[in-house]
Image (cartoon, helix red, strand yellow):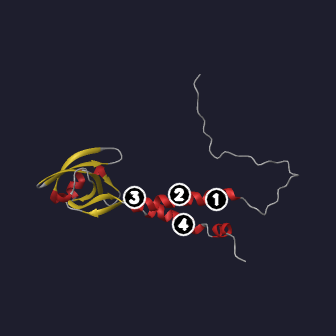
């Protein structure tokens, strides 16, 4: 006898959940590609690794333990380039010598990854909704029991109203 589809989904629910988490954390909606300062268009988002002495001047904009600095390219002036450096708490427009930029990567939107991530999220929510609302067909209702199912709120939101 072939198992029913809901039984198969329940039996292998760990695999789709693990796949969904892998898709969420393993895919990003942007990709980074190595670039040269001369080839960047204005307002291009970038991340860069700077020489140690230049990094020390802009350490407040460094993200992570690899010392990347995020920002936007503004303009190129021969031996220097202007960037708008950003962090979660601040931003600053600075002129950096080109030789102090050790590595430069441009950030480009990845539409394919965005579509895959959105599809995975919607599919995961639909699967959870299907499994949650299906119920168990083999359970008998106990009509003698006077207890009724009650909705117990998991989150309670209180909105204070002034007098």
Mark 2 and mark 4 residues within 8 Å of each other at the beta carbon:
no
Q: Name the residue located 66 percent from the left edge and 45 percent from the top edge.
A: 153
* Front of the two marks 1 and 3: 1
- To which residue does mark 2 refer? 122
Q: Name the residue located 62 percent from the left edge and 41 percent from the top edge.
A: 156
- To which residue does mark 3 refer? 29
Q: Find residue 105 and report its horizontal and vertical position in percent.
A: 27, 60
Indicate whether 163 appears above or below 9.
above
* Front of the two marks 3 and 4: 3
Element at label 2:
helix
Between residue 33 and residue 104, name the one nearer to us: 33
Between discs 1 and 4, the one toward the N terminus = 4
Mark 1 and mark 2 residues within 8 Å of each other at the beta carbon:
no
Cα separation, mark 3 vs mark 4, equals: 19 Å
Q: Find residue 70 and report its horizontal and vertical position in percent.
A: 30, 53
Cα separation, mark 1 vs mark 2, equals: 12 Å
Cα separation, mark 2 vs mark 4, equals: 15 Å
Mark 1 and mark 4 residues within 8 Å of each other at the beta carbon:
no
- To which residue does mark 1 refer? 130
Q: Quadrant of the C terminus?
A: top right
Q: Residues within 10 Å of mark 4 (few under 14, many from 20)?
A: few
Q: Is residue 59 visible?
A: yes
Cα separation, mark 2 vs mark 3, equals: 16 Å
Between residue 160 and residue 134, name the one nearer to us: 134
Left or right: 144 as drawn, with respect to 97:
right
Element at label 1:
helix
Left or right: 48 as drawn, with respect to 115:
left
Q: Name the residue located 22 percent from the left edge and 54 percent from the top edge.
A: 41
- To which residue does mark 4 refer? 18
Cα separation, mark 1 vs mark 4, equals: 18 Å
């Amino acid at each position: 006898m072939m198992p029913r589809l809901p039984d198969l989904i329940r039996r292998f629910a760990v695999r789709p959940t693990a796949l969904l988490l892998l898709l969420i954390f393993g895919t990003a909606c942007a990709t980074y590609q190595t670039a040269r300062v001369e080839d960047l268009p204005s307002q291009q988002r970038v991340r860069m690794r700077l020489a140690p002495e230049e990094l020390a001047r802009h350490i407040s904009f460094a993200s992570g333990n690899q010392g990347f600095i995020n920002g936007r390219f503004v303009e190129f002036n021969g031996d220097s380039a202007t960037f708008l450096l950003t962090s979660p708490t601040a931003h600053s427009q600075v002129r950096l010598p080109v030789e102090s930029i050790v590595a430069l990567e441009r950030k480009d939107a990845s539409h394919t990854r965005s579509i895959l991530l959105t599809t995975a999220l919607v599919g995961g929510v639909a699967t959870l909704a299907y499994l949650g609302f299906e119920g168990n067909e083999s359970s008998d209702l106990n009509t003698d029991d006077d207890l009724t199912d009650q909705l117990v709120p998991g989150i309670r939101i209180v909105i204070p109203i002034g007098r």
